[in-house]
Image: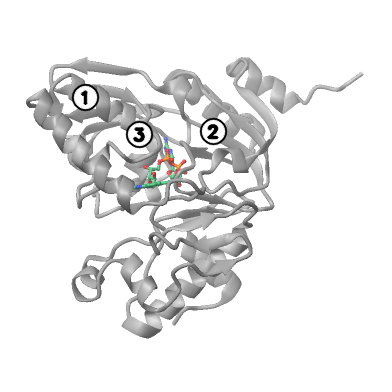
Amino acid sequence: MIELNPIFQELNTICPNGVFQSVALKEFSYWKVGGLADYLIEPQSIEQLSEVIKYLKNQSQLPYMVIGDGSNLLFDDGGYRGVIIRIGNNMSQVKFQGTEVTCEAGVWVPGLAYSTYRKGLTGLEHTCGIPGRLGGLIYMNGGSNRQAISENLKSVILIDEEGNIQTIDASEFDFEYRTSPFQTLKYIIAGAILKLEVSNVSKVRSAMRKILTSRRKKFPRKQPNCGSVFISNPKMYDLIGPPGFAIEKVGLKGLRKGDAQISPLHANFIVNLGDASSTDILYLVSLARKKVYENTNFLMDCEARYVYQTGEICQAHVRAEEIFGCSK
Ligand SMILES: Cc1cc2nc3c(=O)[nH]c(=O)nc-3n(C[C@H](O)[C@H](O)[C@H](O)COP(=O)(O)OP(=O)(O)OC[C@H]3O[C@@H](n4cnc5c(N)ncnc54)[C@H](O)[C@@H]3O)c2cc1C
């Protein structure tokens, strides 16, 4: 007779039919890279998520980490010895009240942008082509056209390490370009209240169309990738140009390591041609950072995050340097 794992059983009592064991992380990363995670859990409400955290903290002591869609994540080939909490479709309710939109963190960002335009609201146009969930976007303070989601936030619904749910005004937090306080504070983003403005539906639609058309031309769409690998440093941008241009200038566009390749279409993207490993991708990260530093004196930092087998998360260049040495 098969003995049922007690941790699985406990988690499954809190989150019925939302718990999985020995899950292939490559299925949860846009890079399609990563070994097995011990557990993956998909909570169905903010309250259920809070109960999961209380159990993990007080009874199991298992490490955990939160993901959205994995559109910015590089998992290790060795996987993860803990619990992945995936906040996606199961936690994606949205409520409109005038110009305020209350969302659970799992809402799909392009879908949210679309539904705000249908209501004649402006503000989220810059997010309409960004894959991923609202929680991931807030964590990354992502956006496009030099805008960021923090500009649209009224408040954030958070869960602390004890499992307590709190709503905190966004003005309490300091956001910077592609940096949020949640990259250092140990909160889970469970939802947010967005503050938008009334506009004209056709004006918002044409702004979104323009953004989507320009993105379709620029970015590789067929091979697995996690978007821009390096953050565009404004100082470097003014003096040298964006990271893609700097990488191309040092002759790395199209370079391959195993099945990882610096995209021939856009050099700030690394694509997986089939069976790339996390180490292949980190090698290209390390090489691009080193060569661009030698050529420009600017050290590019990664937007993409690497997940250690222990669940800690860092900017991918940090792990690349641990393996391949310092770029300076
Ligand atoms: C083709 C392509 C184009 C892209 N274009 C852009 C762009 O224009 N602008 C841009 O900013 N980004 C872009 N990205 C990167 C990525 O889509 C964004 O960073 C996105 O917001 C990440 O969301 P996610 O749900 O996939 O997060 P994930 O990749 O799953 O996670 C990213 C980080 O957020 C943390 N996290 C996720 N959810 C939560 C939560 N609820 N609470 C606490 N922490 C959480 C994770 O632990 C991880 O550290 C692009 C990616 C791709 C593949």
Which disc is residue 116 wearing? 1
Is the residue at mark 3 in contact range of ligand 1, meaning its CB lies under 8 Å from it? Answer: yes
Q: Earlier in the sequence, mark 2 or mark 1?
A: 2
Q: Residue at x 61, y 32 (%)?
A: 40
Spatial separation of the CA atoms under disc 1 and disc 3: 14 Å
Q: Residue at x 22, y 17 (%)?
A: 96
Q: Is residue 112 left or right of residue 25?
A: left
Quick check: marks 2 and 1 in contact, CB under 8 Å? no
Q: Amino acid at mark 1?
A: Thr
Above or below, 105 relative to 80: above
Quadrant containing the N terminus in the rendered view: top right
Q: Position of residue 208 (x, y in %)?
A: 20, 36
Q: Residue at x 44, y 82 (%)?
A: 328
Q: Earlier in the sequence, mark 3 or mark 2?
A: 2
The residue pinned by badge 3 equals 134
The residue pinned by badge 2 equals 85
Which disc is residue 69 wearing? none
Q: Nearer the viewer, residue 178 or 64?
A: 178
Would you call the spot at circle 2 few (<14 residues within 10 Å), some (14-19), or many (20 or more)? many
Q: Amino acid at mark 3?
A: Leu
Would residue 191 be visible to someone looking at this image? yes
Q: Earlier in the sequence, mark 1 or mark 3?
A: 1
Q: Nearer the viewer, residue 194 or 171?
A: 194
Above or below, 201 relative to 277: above
Would you call the spot at circle 1 few (<14 residues within 10 Å), some (14-19), or many (20 or more)? many
Give the SS element for disc 1: helix
Q: Nearer the viewer, mark 1 or mark 3?
A: 1
Q: Nearer the viewer, residue 224 or 106?
A: 224
